[in-house]
Image (spheres, rainbow, N blue to C red):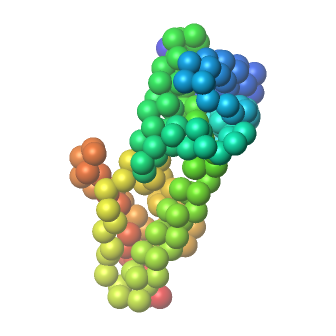
Amino acid sequence: MAQDDDEKTMDQLNDEADIAADYLEGLLDIVDYEGDIELGVRNNRPMVQIVADDDSDIKHLIGRHGEVVDALQQLTRLAVQQKTGERSHLIVDVDGFLKRKRQHLRDVALDAVDEVRETGEPVNLKPMNSFERKVIHDVVREEGLKSRSYGEEPHRYVTVYMKAGNDE
């Protein structure tokens, strides 16, 4: 039985990042893109970032709305799982895309929180993937409100609302 990520050692997480880096370097060679690969562990998850040397080619690895980087992440997770025999929650980022996306989602969440506080009414956000919903839930919780996901993939969305008995 596979271990939970919480049980993985730092060595295991670093090994996953190394396997992912090797896989991504191979892909970069195939498409003849220049870029550096940085490894790390963040929130007990291995992280691999492709950093642009010249900024032009690497942007193609992000894609419109991040579809390409999401696909790269799924493929890289499969490559890691094939080598380790365990599921990985590896994060793949391209040229800081996830950092920019997290900031945008944080802004969306804070706007929803403000609207809920002003009106007292729940706010439904547009459909999002699981990464996006997690960012929203985390920000809403930090702000002292509640949120919940509804619907079925790929139309799953978050509703932000006041806690019961919360009269802000």
Residue 10 appears anywhere in the view: yes
Q: Position of residue 129 (x, y in %)?
A: 38, 48
Q: Position of residue 43 (x, y in %)?
A: 66, 43
Residue 7 appears anywhere in the view: no
Compared with residue 25, is residue 103 higher up or lower down, i.e. above or below?
below
Q: Is residue 77 shown left or right of residue 118? A: right
Q: Is residue 87 shown left or right of residue 19? A: left
In front of the other: 65 or 46 = 65
- Tell me where residue 57 sits by quadrant: top right
Total tally of numbered discs in the picture = 0
Compared with residue 134, is residue 28 higher up or lower down, i.e. above or below?
above
Compared with residue 56, is residue 72 higher up or lower down, i.e. above or below?
above
Compared with residue 120, is residue 88 higher up or lower down, i.e. above or below?
above
In front of the other: 9 or 78 = 78
User: Residue at the spot x=60%, y=24% of the render?
Assistant: 32
User: Residue at the spot x=33%, y=73% of the render?
Assistant: 123
Q: Position of residue 6 (x, y in %)?
A: 62, 33
User: Residue at the spot x=62%, y=20% of the render?
Assistant: 29
